[in-house]
Image: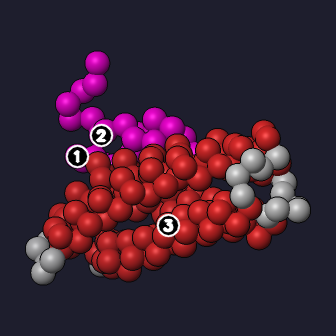
Amino acid sequence: MTNPSSPPRTGAPDKPGAVVAGPGAGAMQALDVMLGHHARLLRLCDALESIADSLPERVDVRQCLQTARGLGPAVRDAHRFEEEVFYPLARAVIGPRPRFEENLTRLQDEHREDESFADEAAEALMDWGLCGGPRGSDMTGYMLRGLFETLRRHIAFEREYLVAPVEDHLAR
């Protein structure tokens, strides 16, 4: 049974189920976890880009399978942490701003789309890893590029719009 005053359990980037920021817990810890999620997603973006660049002749089957297995959970864990822990922290730190809630709603909508896109990409990567690429290489490359470009833009916006103000607040 969870103590109501204990911080929520959310998936930290390298420690699923790790206890992180919540009532009474440190905002610095939440910021570190957020940046850890971003770093994990950016590493996956690099892997997706590498795979897309290698299609169809130089595909690393192991990289396809490893990336496919980690993609969906990494995206979902990051989004869950953002929505349950970091966005409320940002609300508290940043306070009311024009269009702030609309931007958070847009980011959450993007989360659903990115999760669906990540699942499709993981399926394509599994196909390449297990079956040698029954899907067309052009289609797969286009899909992977679309996903990693979208994730990178999303992270860049979060860093500018949410992370930077929280960092500024903590530096005071």
Q: Is residue 60 above or below residue 161?
A: above
Label located before the other in sequence (1 or 2): 2
Disc 2 residue type (three-letter): Pro
Of mark 3 and mark 2, the one earlier in the sequence is 2
Residue stretch in magenta = 1-28
Read off the residue under disc 2.
7
- Residues at marks 3 and 1 touching, judged by CB atoms closer than 8 Å: no
Residue 81, image x and y in percent? 37, 50
The residue beneath circle 1 is 23
Residue at image point 30% right, 40% down: 7
Instruction: Name the quadrant containing residue 52.
Output: bottom right
In the image, residue 145 lies in the stretch drawn in magenta:
no
The one nearer the camera, 63 or 129, is: 129
In the image, is residue 124 above or below residue 87?
above
Q: Nearer the viewer, residue 159 or 89?
A: 159
Q: Pointer 3: residues within 10 angstroms few (<14), some, or many (20+)? A: many
Which numbered dot is residue 151?
3
